[in-house]
Image: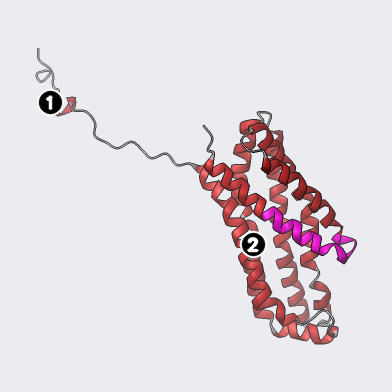
């Protein structure tokens, strides 16, 4: 009996021309957030410095005068705080790649757990400064002494200083992961230096004189994180 007689059709024997399904690389997509986060941070900080913070006057201005100026620009501050929070939480998107890369070099999952937990805290603590400042604006707008707004300006540097502590753990996990992977020699070394600077910058909670060091370490961390993400994009997992 022939194949055709058995009920098969000649077309059934033709090779399939259906295109293979495209595999979505979630890890690579997550890695791009490692570039988006620093870029958004730099853009928002520059915009805040140009369009928002000047409304608060100089630190040496009388507290009442500064408070009234900030309250008059309430909408501008709220918009700035909102964009500031959005830029901060972009770090969460990068943590998927952090977990993937650290698990690839540490099967125990310890480095991945520490890295993701630390990154989550950074993405929460630093942007939360914007939310707390919104609370202060609402409090002043409802009749409280507007001079409190001058003090609430410090919530941003204090939150940044606090976030420098979990930053140490994220840097440490990434440094160990990069060393274990053996694909870069300079990134782990630079990471150690940035970790030391971040620890010193955390002292801003004790003295405002340490804020320049905190700002420098934050800038360096953002650039380093972008470099790590770019390195991972150039060296995909096999």
For the point 67% across and 43% down, the residue is 187
In the rendered image, residue 109, in percent from the top left (x then y), is placed at 68, 33
Q: In which quarter of the image is the N terminus?
A: top left
Residue at the front extreme, as displayed: 186
Please name whichever residue, 207 or 136, is drawn nearer the observer in this view of the structure. 207
- According to the image, label 2 marks what residue? 41
- According to the image, label 1 marks what residue? 10
For the point 61% across and 66% down, the residue is 43
Q: Residues within 10 Å of mark 2 (few under 14, many from 20)?
A: many
Left or right: 197, with 116 as reference point: right
Q: Residues under labels 1 and 2: Cα distance?
A: 62 Å
In the rendered image, residue 73, in percent from the top left (x then y), is placed at 69, 82
- Element type at marker 1? helix
Which mark lies nearer to you, 1 or 2? 2
Q: Does the magenta stretch include residue 209?
A: yes
Q: Is residue 27 visible?
A: no
For the point 80% across and 64% down, the residue is 212
Left or right: 210, with 2 as reference point: right
**Please, is residue 156 above or below residue 184 in the view?**
below
Q: Does the magenta stretch include residue 170?
A: no
Which region is colored magenta? 204-222
Helix, strand or loop for the magenta stretch, by majority: helix
Q: Quadrant of residue 144?
A: bottom right
Q: Is residue 159 visible?
A: yes
For the point 24% across and 34% down, the residue is 17
In the rendered image, residue 58, in percent from the top left (x then y), is placed at 79, 81
- Element type at marker 2? helix
């Amino acid at each position: 009996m022939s194949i055709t007689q058995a009920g098969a059709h000649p077309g059934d024997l033709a090779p399939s021309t259906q295109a293979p399904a495209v595999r979505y690389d979630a890890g690579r997509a997550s890695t791009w957030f490692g570039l988006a986060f620093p870029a958004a941070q730099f853009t928002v900080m520059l915009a805040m410095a140009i369009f928002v913070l000047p409304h608060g006057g100089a630190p040496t201005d009388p507290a009442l005068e500064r408070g009234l100026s900030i309250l008059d620009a309430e909408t501008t501050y709220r918009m700035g705080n909102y964009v500031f929070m959005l830029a901060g939480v972009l770090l969460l998107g990068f943590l998927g790649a952090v977990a993937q890369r650290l698990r690839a070099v540490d099967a125990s999952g310890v480095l991945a757990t520490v890295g993701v937990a630390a990154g989550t805290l950074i993405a929460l603590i630093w942007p939360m400064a914007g939310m707390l400042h919104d609370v202060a604006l609402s409090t002043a707008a409802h009749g409280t002494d507007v001079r409190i707004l001058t003090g609430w300006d410090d919530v941003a540097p204090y939150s940044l200083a606090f976030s420098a502590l979990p930053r140490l753990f994220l840097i440490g996990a990434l440094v160990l992961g990069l060393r274990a992977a053996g694909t870069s020699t300079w990134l782990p070394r630079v990471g150690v230096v940035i970790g030391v600077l971040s620890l010193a910058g955390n002292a801003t909670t004790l003295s405002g004189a340490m804020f320049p060091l905190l700002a420098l370490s934050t800038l360096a961390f953002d650039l380093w994180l972008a470099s790590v993400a770019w390195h991972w994009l150039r060296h995909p997992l096999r």
